Image (tube, rainbow, N blue to C red):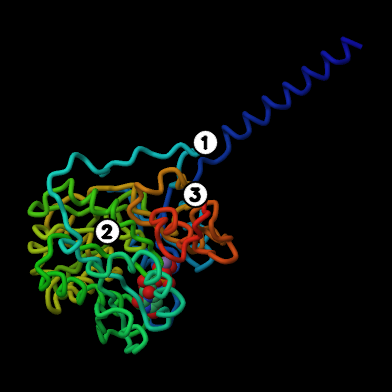
Amino acid sequence: MLKRCGRRLLLALAGALLACLLVLTADPPPPPVPAERGRRALRSLAGPSGAARAPGLEAAAAAPGAPVREVHSLSEYFSLLTRSRRDAGPPPGGVPRPADGRPRSPVEQLAPRDVFIAVKTTKKFHRARLDLLLETWISRHEEMTFIFTDGEDEALARRTGHVVNTNCSAAHSRQALSCKMAVEYDRFIESGRKWFCHVDDDNYVNVRALLRLLGSYPHTQDIYLGKPSLDRPIQATERVSENKVRPVHFWFATGGAGFCISRGLALKMSPWASGGHFLSTAERIRLPDDCTVGYIVEALLGVPLVRCGLFHSHLENLQQVPASALHEQVTLSYGMFENKRNAVHIKGPFSVEADPSRFRSIHCHLYPDTPWCPRTAIF
Ligand code: UDP
Ligand code: MN
């Protein structure tokens, strides 16, 4: 009996060893490719016919010197994005990567009117997305928040005086998005405020945490704060003259997680960002608005992005943001991730059905004195 068990055990061990050897000698995993931007990047890289120009992945993320990977179909592109997002995700065990760019000791006491938060939206999302923001975080911080949209909306104008109709096209094209960013930048410069922050209309901004973070950097210095979603610099092609292009690589903060720029830096960006210049700069590298900001700051001005793990887009797994650390997070989001609903995990006070984005629950967690928050809520 013992002998038979011993033989079985030996056989099992040999099998396991063989399996390990097979895994170790199998092909190495493919090199990582763009780790983010999903549909937005795809749309932006799509030519006029709507088909993605695969070698348009000239804008792929690549380590300096690494060959740029060619992608030949949309489905291949999607699967590469999904795979590399997984590669770039947090390490197993849910241990978060150390976040730099965390608030340091305060250097400036900021008042809400020192900060200009630009929310990018489009008319079709006024009811679907913006109303939720107006009910939650914007309701507490109207003087900081400016809404940049593309269509008149009387109901919206009645709710807040800070609506800017950019008259940009309502399309989700590279040009239309850059047109909005250009108007955001110009309005910020006119405002005279100390900090410019940009967010999308699917972001929750935790303004107390934002003020803490910004107050730990001097606004007169060159500060570009945000979170890249790629795990390496983006590699693009920069047009330098009529018939000359050259490769360029730089980090950029993903627009979907929000980012902030100090006034000192914003003023230096002016030759490439003010008036109509932002659009022509975006054309020079043929990338979306947030990449263009990174290009101006990192590639043209030589100012490095300060990475901050407190900004969050729906291109990362939001379930991994610990509910106990919500007070510290600067931005949150909701949406889809790897074809699944992606939102912050927080218990109550609203059910997932009643509050799928979790923004109402987050808001009650951060501002329990809000009149519509259930009084009995226990977190
Ligand atoms: N957006 C826009 N015009 C459009 C579609 C979207 O200005 O035609 C804005 C939208 O309001 C949001 C941002 O672009 O602030 C990103 O859009 P979305 O979240 O739908 O796409 P993502 O890039 O996150 O996949
Ligand atoms: Mn989004």
> With 192 as the anchor, is 306 left or right in this view?
right
Q: Which residue is mark 3?
A: 86
The residue closer to the viewer here, 43 or 115, is: 115
Q: Quadrant of residue 244?
A: bottom left
Earlier in the chain: of badge 1 and badge 3, it is 3
Taking the image in four quarters, ligand 1 sits in the one at bottom left
Q: Residues within 10 Å of mark 1 (few under 14, many from 20)?
A: few
Q: Which residue is mark 2?
A: 259
Q: Nearer the viewer, mark 1 or mark 3?
A: 1
Considering only vertical position in the picture, is 103 above or below 224?
above
Q: Say whether marks 3 and 2 touch (CB < 8 Å).
A: no
Q: How far apart are labels 1 and 3 at the CA level?
A: 14 Å
Q: How far apart are labels 3 and 2 at the CA level?
A: 23 Å
Element at badge 2? strand
Earlier in the chain: of badge 3 and badge 2, it is 3
Element at badge 3? helix
Q: Residue at x 39, y 69 (%)?
A: 133
Amino acid beneath label 3: Arg
Residue 110: x percent and y percent?
16, 54
Q: Say whether marks 1 and 3 touch (CB < 8 Å).
A: no
Q: Residue at x 54, y 41 (%)?
A: 27
